Image (tube, rainbow, N blue to C red):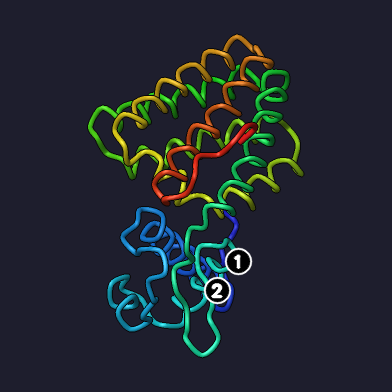
Amino acid sequence: MTPATHPAPANVTSLAEHRLLHEAVIDRLRDLIVTGELAPEAKLNERVLAERLGTSRTPLREAIKFLASEGLVELVPNRGAMVAPLKPEKMREVFVVLGALEALAGELACRNASEADIADIRALHYHMLAHHARGELAPYFRYNQQIHQRILDCAGNATLSQTWRALNAHVRRARYMANLSRERWDQAVHEHEEMLDALSRRDGAKLQVLLRDHLANKLVLVIEALGGFAPKENA
C-alpha cells in the first residue's frame, strides 16, 4: 500500500509562503536600486513602492530593513528610508578589499574547482555573452554576478565567500554602473573571456592578476562617474 501523505501544517505552509514573498520583495526592490531606477538619496515612499511592487507595506518594510543591512538603503531618524548615496571614498575602500578577495578566490578555485564546476561557469559565461550581444544589461549583470559568486564558491573557503558576499552587497550598484559605458562593457566581457581561459587552464597566478585588475578597472569608471578622482596605485 502507498503510505498516506499528510499536508504540511497550515502554520508551516504560511511561514514558507511568507519567506518566499519576503525574498521576492527584497529581490525586486534591490533590482530597482541596483539598476538606478531608484536613484541614490531618493526617498522610499512606502505607499508608492507597495503599489509598484504589488505588495503590502509589511513585507516592503521588512525588505527595506534587509537592504539597509546590505548598505543599499539608509534609515534616517524622523525622515524614513532613502536609497543610500554612493560615496567615492567608500567605493575605493571596498573595491580594493574585494579585488584582494577575488584574487585569492581565483587562485584557490584553480586548485579546487572540479571539471563540472568549470563547465557550470562556462555555461553562465555563454548566457552572459548572449545578453551582452543583445544589449540587455540587467540580465547580463545577473549572470556576471553569478560567475563571480561561483568562482568564490569553487575556492572552497566559506569565510572567504561570506566576507565577499557582505562586501559585494555594498558595491553592487557601482559594479552595475561601471557597465553603463558601452566601451567599458565590451572591455569587461573581454576580461571575462581571459578569466575563463585562465580558470580552464588552472592558471591560478594569472587568474589572480586578472580578477584584481578587473575590479580596479571597474573602480576607475565608478569614481569618474561619481565625479571623484581616479584611484591611485593598488586601487
The amino acid pointed to by label 2 is Lys
- Residue 12 appearing in the image: yes
Label 1 and label 2: CA atoms lie apart by: 7 Å
Q: Is residue 168 left or right of residue 218?
A: right
* Residue with the mark numbered 2: 65
Q: Is residue 186 above or below residue 81?
A: above
Q: Is residue 122 above or below residue 73?
A: above
Q: Is residue 70 left or right of residue 37?
A: right
Q: Position of residue 47 (x, y in %)?
A: 33, 84
Front-most of residues 60 and 14: 60
Residue drawn at x 42%, y 28% is 188
- Which label number is shown at residue 69? 1
Label 1's element?
A: helix
Q: Residue furthest bottom?
A: 78
The amino acid pointed to by label 1 is Ser
Q: Is residue 103 left or right of residue 45?
A: right
Residue drawn at x 67%, y 42% is 97
Task: Count neighbours of disc 1 (C-alpha within 10 A) and say few if under 14, some if 14 to 19, many if 20 or more.
Answer: some
Front-most of residues 97 and 57: 97
Residue drawn at x 39%, y 76% is 44
Q: Give yes or no for contact between labels 1 and 2 (Cβ–Cβ under 8 Å).
A: yes
Front-most of residues 123 and 228: 228
Q: Position of residue 54 (x, y in %)?
A: 30, 73
